[in-house]
């Protein structure tokens, strides 16, 4: 599961219900606000169409105002689209200066065994996230701080699963439809590698060869 807990600013409510992931939702366009519009993290919020306080607060949310949202990040195979967030909880009564952007990716894995330093002196590698019960993989970058280089160097291995805690970051160039999308990790961890199972027996020759079947030819 991939979780987000963030202060989001509403751009607009979508007029029509959205069918997704086997359910019907009210939808809205929102962002993790930033100092410039090309570095805002764009999101599509999905709130279950089920009567209750959460839905009431969602449909009464005013564009340009902020709420604190807890939910599940759902990756898709289209990197041009905003990330989907299924809203679990919505808090409207928050201080104006409150800013939170916390994300935990619980099903990520390293794409390769290499990392490099970017212009901001952050260590960067690529990670993948697989959709629920699907073989489609979404790729994004994981950035982390130089102080965590020893840990990254020890843990990174192609295909190795990892759990990452940090915050989402996006950047859009004017001439590009797909954003640069990353999670800036302040913590990450992995499951201990399992040692390969030993074959049965001690490997010594037991003097018995398999009988060839000459009827099958070569």
Image (cartoon, rainbow, N blue to C red):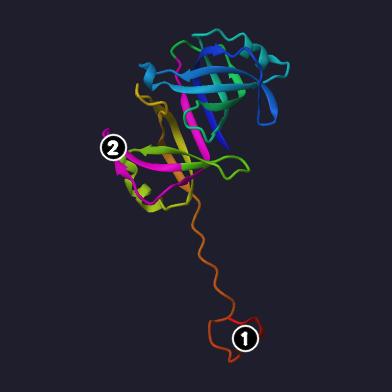
Q: Quadrant of residue 200?
A: bottom right
Task: Determine whether, in the image, residue 216 is placed left or right of residue 147.
Answer: right
Check disc 1 and report the residue beneath it. Answer: 210
Residue at 54 percent across and 82 percent down: it is: 202
In x, y percent, where is residue 104?
50, 35
Q: Is residue 113 above or below residue 166?
A: below
Q: Quadrant of residue 72?
A: top right
Q: CA distance from mark 1 to mark 2?
A: 57 Å
Q: Earlier in the sequence, mark 1 or mark 2?
A: 2
Residue at 37 percent across and 47 percent down: it is: 152
Q: Is residue 202 above or below residue 133?
A: below
Task: Determine whether, in the image, residue 51 is placed left or right of residue 169.
Answer: right
1 and 2 marks in contact (CB < 8 Å): no
In x, y percent, where is residue 70?
57, 25
Q: Is residue 65 above or below residue 26?
A: above
Residue 46 part of the magenta segment: no
Q: Quadrant of residue 120?
A: top left
In x, y percent, where is residue 131?
58, 40
**Number of labelled discs?**
2
Task: Determine whether, in the image, residue 80 is placed left or right of residue 19.
Answer: left
Secondary element type, mark 1:
loop
Check disc 2 and report the residue beneath it. Answer: 118
- Please state the extent of the stretch shown in magenta in the rendering: 98-127
Residue at 37 percent across and 20 percent down: it is: 38
Q: Which mark is residue 198?
A: none
Secondary element type, mark 2:
loop
């Amino acid at each position: 599961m991939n979780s987000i807990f963030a202060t989001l600013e509403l751009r607009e409510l979508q007029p029509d219900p959205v069918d997704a992931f086997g359910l019907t939702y009210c939808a809205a366009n929102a962002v993790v606000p930033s100092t410039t519009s090309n570095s805002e993290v764009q999101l599509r919020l999905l709130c279950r169409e089920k009567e209750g306080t959460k839905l009431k607060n969602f449909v009464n949310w005013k564009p340009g105002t902020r709420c604190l949202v807890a939910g599940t990040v759902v990756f898709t195979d289209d990197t041009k689209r905003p990330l989907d967030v299924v809203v679990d909880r919505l808090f409207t009564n928050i201080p104006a200066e409150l800013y939170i952007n916390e994300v935990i990716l619980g099903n990520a894995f390293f794409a390769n065994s290499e990392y490099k330093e970017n212009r901001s002196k952050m260590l960067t590698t690529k990670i993948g996230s697989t959709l629920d019960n699907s073989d489609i993989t979404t790729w994004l970058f994981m950035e982390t701080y130089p102080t965590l280089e020893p840990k990254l160097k020890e843990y990174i291995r192609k295909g190795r699963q990892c759990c990452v805690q940090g915050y989402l970051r996006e950047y859009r160039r004017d001439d590009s439809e797909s954003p640069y999308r990353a999670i800036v990790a302040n913590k990450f961890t992995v499951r201990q590698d399992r040692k390969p199972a030993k074959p049965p027996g001690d490997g010594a020759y037991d003097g018995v060869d398999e009988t060839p079947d000459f009827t099958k030819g070569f």
